[in-house]
Image (cartoon, grey):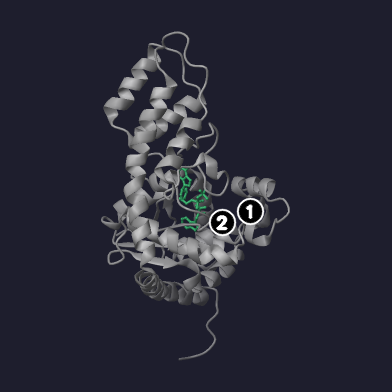
Amino acid sequence: MDTVVSGTRPTGTLHLGNYFGAVRNYVRLQNEAAKTFYFIADYHSLTTHHQPDTLGDLVRETAATYIAAGLDPDKTCLYVQSDVPETAELYLLFNMVAYKGELEKVPTFKEKIRKHDTNVNAGLLTYPVLMAADILIHRANKVPVGKDQEQHLEMTRHFAQRFNRRFGEDYFPEPVAYNFGNALIKVPGLDGMGKMSKSDNPNSAILFSDEDKAIRKKIMKAKTDAGPTEPGMPLTEEVANLFGLMELVSAPEAVKSFKSSYNDASIRYGDLKKQLAEDMVAFVAPFRERIRELLADRESLDRILRRGGEQARESAQETVRHARAMAGIRYYSA
Ligand code: ADP
Ligand code: TRP
């Protein structure tokens, strides 16, 4: 019996990377696993973003994107992280089994201090501890995420193992980053390097809020190279990325035909981009419209999130009660 947990930070509008790396699998698992919990990681977003005036809108937009992608609030528990304060208590307990040295070595931490060197706060350092608490608060065993989160899951397993060992009970499971037995996904950005990201470089990302015109413009501006000069040349990273995106949204025959024109060195990147842009527009537009409709009915959206928060708390309270008892925090009878 699988229990699944995953979340996304409300740091901006979701993009294709979030969808193909994570949210698409949230939806698949909703129909397969015994229990699924999907949340909006608002506490995590505070480690790097502090915009109190827009946070609420981003939280609702993230929730609307989940639902537009196919999450059904009657089948899955959809909630906001900060509506489950038990997570913060479990985070505190796990901080006692997390070592400063190992946290400092996490690649995402090192990268973040490079980018946010004026705000290296303790929340950023203990980011993986809070993430472990998110997952273990429901004692989940599967976590659908993109490739960039692999290391965080490894930390989660360490914390679970150590807590169990320290307090002498095999209570917490050791969850895995999950993609149906396949390698985890990294959707590339349009700038020819790194992953598509809402928080790092929004211009490299196709967002679900992008209008058709903006999508076409971003794709036409994507980096390419001078083109193959002879048959059978290897792909540069930029062009491989474009083919990678095409594989996600275009018909297999279209991908095949452009690959073969690349291989015989007759390809025109302009044609490839035009095809990709049209296929991308056709993919994104229905999402965008559905998200808009959902956002227009704020009351329903808020009702869904409040109800999800209450359900998540029930599961969380049980775990925290047990974890406190394991640590010896049980002083009073009845
Ligand atoms: P971002 O990096 O854009 O701020 P988040 O860190 O909130 O996005 O990621 C939310 C989920 O989406 C995570 O499971 C993450 O692994 C996944 N994800 C984000 N970007 C990509 C990408 N380019 N390719 C694959 N998965 C991604
Ligand atoms: N760290 C994840 C990201 O940046 C978001 C996240 C927070 C998460 N808590 C989680 C993902 C728990 C899966 C499970 O994308």
Instruction: Please name the amino acid that badge 2 sits on.
Output: Pro
Which quadrant of the structure image shows residue 247? Answer: top left
In this view, which residue lies farthest toward the right?
118
- Identified at 56% across, 67% down, the residue is 91
In this view, which residue lies farthest toward the front?
213
Instruction: Please name the amino acid that badge 1 sits on.
Output: Leu
In this view, which residue lies farthest toward the bottom?
334
For residue 264, side relative to residue 158 (left or right):
left
Comparing 31 with 182, the one in front is 31
* Place of residue 99 in the rendered image (x, y in percent of width and height, measured from the top left): 64, 57
Give yes or no for contact between labels 1 and 2 (Cβ–Cβ under 8 Å).
Answer: yes
Comparing 187 with 330, the one in front is 187
Tell whether circle 2 marks a residue whose Cβ is less than 8 angstroms from ligand 2. no
* Place of residue 263 in the rendered image (x, y in percent of width and height, measured from the top left): 39, 14
Describe the element under mark 2 as helix, strand or loop: helix
Describe the element under mark 1 as helix, strand or loop: helix
Q: CA distance from mark 1 to mark 2?
A: 8 Å
For residue 176, side relative to residue 201 (left or right):
left
Which quadrant of the structure image shows residue 304? Answer: bottom left
* Badge 1: residue crowd in 10 Å (few <14, some 14–19, many ≥20): some
> Is there any visible trace of residue 70 in the rendered image?
yes
- Identified at 50% across, 27% down, the residue is 238
Q: Earlier in the sequence, mark 1 or mark 2?
A: 1
* Badge 2: residue crowd in 10 Å (few <14, some 14–19, many ≥20): many
Comparing 274 with 37, the one in front is 274
> Is there any visible trace of residue 66 in the rendered image?
no
Q: Which residue is mark 2?
A: 128
Q: Which mark is residue 103?
A: 1
